[in-house]
Image (tube, helix red, strand yellow):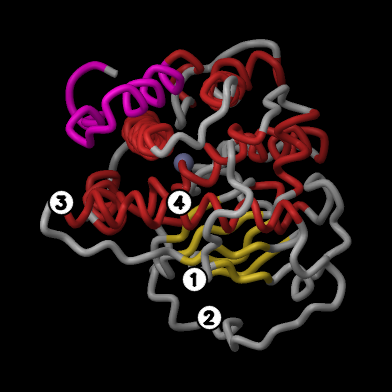
Amino acid sequence: MLWRGRRQSDNVEDDRSDSGGGLGGGLGGSPGQFRVPIGGRAGGGGSIILVILVVLAGWYFGFDPSQILGDGSGGQITDDSGSQDNGGAPANDEMKQFVATVLADTEDTWTGIFKSQGLTYEDPKLVLFSGQVRSACGFASAAAGPFYCPGDHKVYLDMTFFQQLDQQFGASGEFARAYVVAHEVGHHVQNLTGIMGKFNQMRQGMSEADANQLSVRIELQADCFAGVWAHFTQQKGILEQGDIESALNAAKQIGDDTLQKKMQGYVVPESFNHGTSQQRQTWLARGFKSGKLTDCNTMSGPI
Ligand SMILES: [Zn+2]
């Protein structure tokens, strides 16, 4: 992606030096801090199971459905004092610049799309954190992967996830990382358009299996929205050869079936909550091909 020299977003909040720190590559920390997507599957296992779950949880970048169930008021959160603390993490490293540029590009794209529908897009904030973070959705560890909190309209990202994506999950390339950011922004779009609110309502009282199926549809739509963004990025002529392939490969590597096979040797389809590799690739590619939101209707029909 030819991102250097392009506009960088002002909506990046660098909280990397504020957090507890010291958790390293996202697998540390105490079990109490981990948020496992769709809680309750830990099943009372011992520490080994917990570690496995934590590793698995690290795969599920995206919003954590259990967080959506939080009150979402955000009223108790007071950590955004706006003070700049530059101790610790490098203040303006290249990866931060990359993320800020990708975020800016999503702002431009979604502002344009919303405008064409007579709507106003509100930029989300993107919080860079290190190890652990407090959001309006509660306390989160880097091990849970990047996430979007609808309560405060913020994307939370510990950039060590990018290394994990590359080294552990076999999803390398700049555009794989851009896809991660664009997917989270896709959840923000769902929040602004009311899709996420509806999702929260619908999943109330559902069985876990049904809620998982609904979650898959929400996640695939965020993938499709990331594809829509990539479509317009290509139109600007800033995609390079191999970019889309690296995003599609990332979608494949983080598919529920691929992850489960890798981590536990077998798959449990009813526990899928992000979609299979094939589904994730299909919806990402679909959004990319047309650039149309109407092609991202994952909420009805076969997926
Ligand atoms: Zn997601």
Work out how far the residue at label 1 is from the one at label 2, CA to CA, in angstroms: 6 Å
User: What span is colored magenta in the figure?
Assistant: 279-302
Residue that carries the numbered disc 4 in the rendered image? 105
Marks 1 and 3, how far apart in space? 31 Å
Q: Is residue 208 visible?
A: no
Q: Residue at x 56, y 41 (%)?
A: 178
Q: In the rendered structure, are the residues bearing label 4 and label 2 in contact, judged by CB atoms less than 8 Å apart? A: no
Residue at left 28%, top 32%? 291
Give the image location of residue 122, x and y in percent: 32, 66
Q: Is residue 299 magenta?
A: yes
- Lower position in the chain sequence, tag 1 or tag 3: 3
The quarter of the rendered structure image containing the N terminus is: top right
Q: Nearer the viewer, residue 291 or 4?
A: 4
Q: Residue at x 21, y 54 (%)?
A: 114
Which residue lies under the disc numbered 2?
Answer: 77
Marks 1,2: beta carbons within 8 A: yes
What numbered label is drawn on residue 136?
1
Identify the amino acid type marked 1: Ala
Q: Give residue 116's mark.
A: 3
Q: Secondary structure at mark 3?
A: helix
